[in-house]
Amino acid sequence: MRNLLFSLAIMMAFASCDNCIESPIIDRYYLIEVLADPGDGSGTFQAVESDKFIEFYSDGTVTSNGELCGMGIDSNSATSGTYSLDTYTISTSSCMDLNFAVTGDEVILDYPCFEPCRAKFLK
């Protein structure tokens, strides 16, 4: 009987998170720099002071205390969406999909601009 209960408990533990994403991206990242190229390729990331964050969850959702669809540094409007590690995109109902990249402890969001527009977040 104990073996049966133990086996059942193990199976429940594995089955409880079928839709969860196992990834080191699961965390909260704070906005530290933005890049808005002036059109000649000379743009570089510039440090910002902001409380804005983006948080990735294991169920494939992403939230922010600021606008996900804009490069603003304000942290006064909660937004959310979903993300895919297959395509490295964030989807919301407010804008077209955003591409992102993960490098170590950094996440860089790419915004839809003619010239590079990016926001860099750090764990």
Image (cartoon, rainbow, N blue to C red):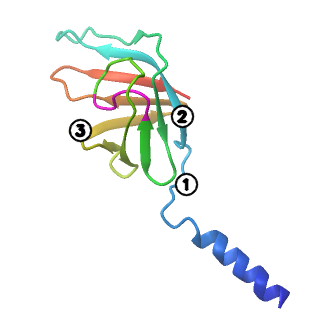
* Residue 26 located within the stretch drawn in magenta: no
> Marks 1 and 2: which is nearer the front?
2
Helix, strand or loop at label 3? It is loop
Classify the position of the N terminus by image quarter: bottom right
Left or right, 33 with respect to 14, comes to left
Query: Which callout, 1 or 2, points at the residue further toward the start of the chain?
Result: 1
| Residue 27, horizontal then vertical, whole percent | 55, 39
Q: Depth check: give the residue in front, 107 or 4.
A: 4
Separation of disc 3 and disc 1 at Cα? 27 Å
> Marks 3 and 1: which is nearer the front?
3
Location of residue 75 with respect to 43 vertically, above or below: below
Separation of disc 2 and disc 3 at Cα? 21 Å
| Residue 10, horizontal then vertical, whole percent | 71, 75
Residue range highlighted in magenta: 64-69
Mark 3 residue type:
Ser
Left or right, 56 with respect to 4, comes to left
Classify the position of the C terminus by image quarter: top right
Location of residue 11 with respect to 85 vertically, above or below: below
Neighbour class for label 3 at 10 Å: few (<14), some, many (≥20)?
few
| Residue 100, horizontal then vertical, whole percent | 36, 36
Residue with the mark numbered 2 = 28
Separation of disc 1 and disc 2 at Cα? 15 Å
Mark 1 residue type:
Glu
Left or right, 74 with respect to 43, comes to right
At a point 37% along the width and 52% down the height, the residue shown is: 86
Disc marking residue 94: 3
Residue with the mark numbered 1 = 22
